Every structure is written in C-alpha cells, then in structure tokens.
C-alpha cells in the first residue's frame, strides 16, 4: 500500500469500516510508515476531542417530557396532536443541526490537521534540499512571472525588505495533490516559507500553531490562503503576516 492510498483510507481505518484485507494492508503500512502512523494518531486524537464535546441528556428528561404531555387537557385531539408533532419536529430538527455541525467541525479539523502536516513536511524538505529556491530573486516583478505556466493562478509576490523580511525567491510545491506557490523570505538567519493558493471560502482570521519547534501561521487575504512556517518566533511571524 502506498501513502496516497493510506491517506484516503485512514479515516475509515480509525472507524473500523474497512474490509479485512484493507485493514490488514493498512495496519502493515502504518507499522512501516512513520508519517502515516502520525496521521492516523492525529485522526484518533481528533475523534477523542470531538467525543469529549458530546453531552448526555439530563437524567429524568424523558419522564419530564412524558409528564408534561399527560398534564395537557384533552380538549381537542387535533390541536394537542399538532402541538406534540410540532414539538417533536423541532426537536428532531435541532438534533439534525447539531449532528451536522459536529460532522462539519470534525471534517474541518481533519482537513486542518492533514494540511498542517503537508505544509510542515514541505517546509522541512526545503531546508534539506540543495536548491530550496527555484527562482532566486528579491524582485517581485521577476519572481511573479516565473510562476506563469507552472501553477494555475497568479500569486501575490511582495518584497518586504523595508519591513525586515527580504524576498529570497520562490518555487513550486505540491500540497494536497495540487501545485501551489511557495515564496521564501529571510529574517536574519531564519528561513520563512510562505505557501499560498486560491481561497474557495470566505476569509478566515489568522491562526497560529506551534509544532515540533516551528511556528505555523495560516490566514486568508486578497482571495488567497496563506500558510507561513519558520523557526522564527511567533511575534515576528505575526509581523510578516501583517505585511503580506
């Protein structure tokens, strides 16, 4: 089993929804691949976090509801039946909304965890490559046209030398199966990778993660999603985000 297939099956694997042969293959792959094992652990932790958010109905709620119905005077069967059905329909609707909200939150958390891992892997990989920059230039008018034909959008490229974050260049990365832009900035001896691609949803506020000694910052602006990663401190990462 390859990592691409394992990532597609990891959610079903953690929920015990795979066929026997798939589960065996997934178990063997997880034992031999640290990255996929970490991804499976992320899914497990997300599931535990969501499960802790559930709340049981208060004790005696069922009996209170039944007693409330019995206290109603049977003046007319149709109005009482209508009121009961309306109450029941409202309860079912509220439960449905709650379930949908929980599913959406869990799916969003899973996608966020997967993206965070992909981005962090791309950042670390660039640090050990001989050529982490494919187009080396501090001129945005040189770097931006270089992406033409290499990705399916025009990235926002800014030289932030005035703010203490000189542009070093850029490259193409593949994250979540698509080609995206990666801009490289410097801050003293620190390397900052800024990954970006077109946003498909309304803007989101900046969110910060500290992972394995790296500061990860993600936000959306000007129609693009941004992920910035570096071992630079969180305060200076925030300064970079304000200028992009």
Image: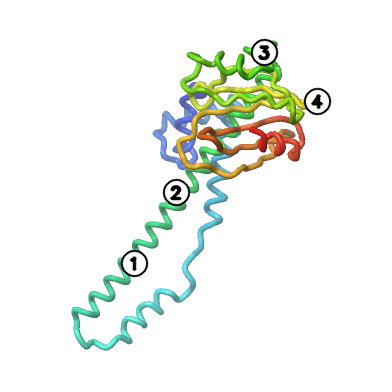
Which sits earlier in the primary sequence, circle 4 or circle 2? 2
* Residue 127 percent across, percent down from the top left: 70, 20
> What is the C-alpha distance between the residues marked 3 and 4?
17 Å
> What is the C-alpha distance between the residues marked 2 and 1?
20 Å
Q: Do labels 3 and 4 touch, CB within 8 Å?
A: no
* Residue 33 percent across, percent down from the top left: 59, 25
* For discs 4 and 2, the disc positioned in front in the rendered view: 4
40 in relation to 133, above or below = below
Question: In the rendered image, which residue does mark 4 sit on?
Answer: 188
Residue lying at 75% horizontally and 40% vertically, measured from the top left = 235
Q: In this view, does 222 lie to the left or right of 99?
A: right
Task: Name the secondary structure under disc 1.
Answer: helix
Question: In the rendered image, which residue does mark 2 sit on?
Answer: 103
Q: Is residue 204 left or right of residue 91?
A: right
Which sits earlier in the primary sequence, circle 3 or circle 4? 3
Q: Do labels 4 and 2 touch, CB within 8 Å?
A: no
């Amino acid at each position: 089993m390859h990592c691409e297939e394992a990532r597609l099956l990891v959610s079903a694997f953690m929920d015990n929804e795979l066929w026997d042969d798939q589960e065996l293959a997934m178990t063997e792959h997880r034992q031999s691949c640290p990255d996929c094992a970490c991804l499976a652990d992320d899914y497990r932790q997300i599931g535990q976090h969501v499960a802790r958010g559930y709340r049981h109905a208060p004790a005696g709620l069922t009996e209170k509801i039944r007693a409330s119905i019995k206290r109603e005077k049977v003046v007319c069967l149709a109005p009482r039946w209508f009121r009961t059905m309306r109450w029941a329909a409202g309860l079912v609707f509220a439960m449905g909304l709650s379930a949908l909200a929980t599913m959406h939150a869990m799916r969003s958390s899973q996608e966020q965890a997967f993206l965070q891992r992909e981005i962090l892997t791309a950042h670390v990989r660039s640090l050990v490559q001989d050529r982490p920059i494919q187009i080396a230039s501090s001129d945005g008018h040189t770097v931006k046209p270089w992406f033409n034909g290499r990705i399916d959008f025009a990235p926002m490229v800014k030289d932030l030398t005035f703010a203490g974050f000189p542009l070093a260049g850029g490259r193409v990365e593949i994250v979540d199966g698509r080609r995206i832009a990666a801009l490289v900035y410097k801050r003293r001896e620190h390397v900052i990778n800024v990954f970006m691609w077109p946003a498909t949803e309304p803007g989101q506020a900046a969110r910060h993660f500290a992972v394995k000694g790296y500061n990860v910052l993600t936000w959306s602006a000007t129609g693009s999603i941004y992920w910035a990663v570096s071992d630079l401190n969180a305060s200076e990462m925030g300064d970079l985000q304000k200028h992009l």
